[in-house]
Amino acid sequence: MNDLPSPYRNDACADRLSLVAASFYRLLGHPLIDSFDNLTNALWEAPAAIVAHGIEDDPIFFFGNRMALQAFEMDAERFITTPSRLSAEPELRKDRQALLDRVKRDGFIDDYAGVRISATGQRFRIENAIVWNVLDDSGVRQGQAAMFERWVAL
């Protein structure tokens, strides 16, 4: 049974997720996931939380997989309308922005740790996260993505 949320069942999402996976490979030198058959479903079911946002002035999430939605306690419909800055508490947003600026400059980081907040206000810590630029085929940045394997409620 396919439980892929409806916001992810379209060609535009598939195209953006293809850039997420291709950028990861290009920047880190190994695949984001093992199988690229039906990439959208594979990312949805990945054994790590994967999120991505665009390049709007106030970037909006365009993808959060099953594990990410569990961590952030949201459904896909709400997640893809959420500015990514809201994933951090107000007092931590400056640190979050510094991390994103570092990724923008360096292409990726593979040592991120930080505190995030869910839709219900639950604080959680992620460690050993990878954050990378999402690039199109010409190398133009189209967003940023992150992956973390576990989180711990605080």
Image (cartoon, helix red, strand yellow):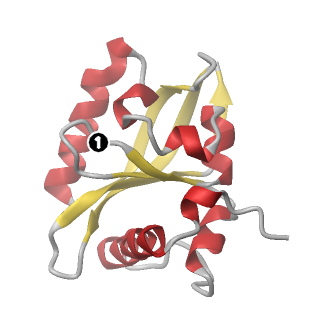
Mark 1, secondary structure of its residue:
loop
Amino acid type shown at disc 1? Pro
Percent x, y for residue 135?
25, 69
Image height check: is 106 above or below 90?
below
Image height check: is 143 above or below 58?
below
Percent x, y for residue 28?
36, 71
Q: Is residue 116 left or right of residue 26?
A: right
Q: Quadrant of residue 98?
A: top left
Percent x, y for residue 121?
59, 16
Please, which residue is most extreme toward the top here?
91
Please, which residue is most extreme toward the bottom here?
37
Q: Quadrant of residue 154?
A: top right
Taking depth in this image into account, of 54 and 128 the one nearest to the observer is 54
Q: Is residue 58 left or right of residue 146?
A: left
In the picture, the quarter occupied by the N terminus is bottom right
Query: Which residue is rendered at x = 37% and y = 34% of the image?
Result: 83
Query: Which residue is rendered at x = 35% and y = 19% of the image?
Result: 92
Taking depth in this image into account, of 141 and 125 the one nearest to the observer is 141
Q: Is residue 69 left or right of residue 129?
A: right
Query: Which residue is rendered at x = 61% and y = 80% of the image?
Result: 34
Taking depth in this image into account, of 11 and 53 the one nearest to the observer is 11
Q: Is residue 130 left or right of residue 125?
A: left
Which residue is tagged 1? 59
Image height check: is 49 above or below 8?
above
Q: Residues within 10 Å of mark 1 (few under 14, many from 20)?
A: some
Q: Quadrant of residue 6?
A: bottom right
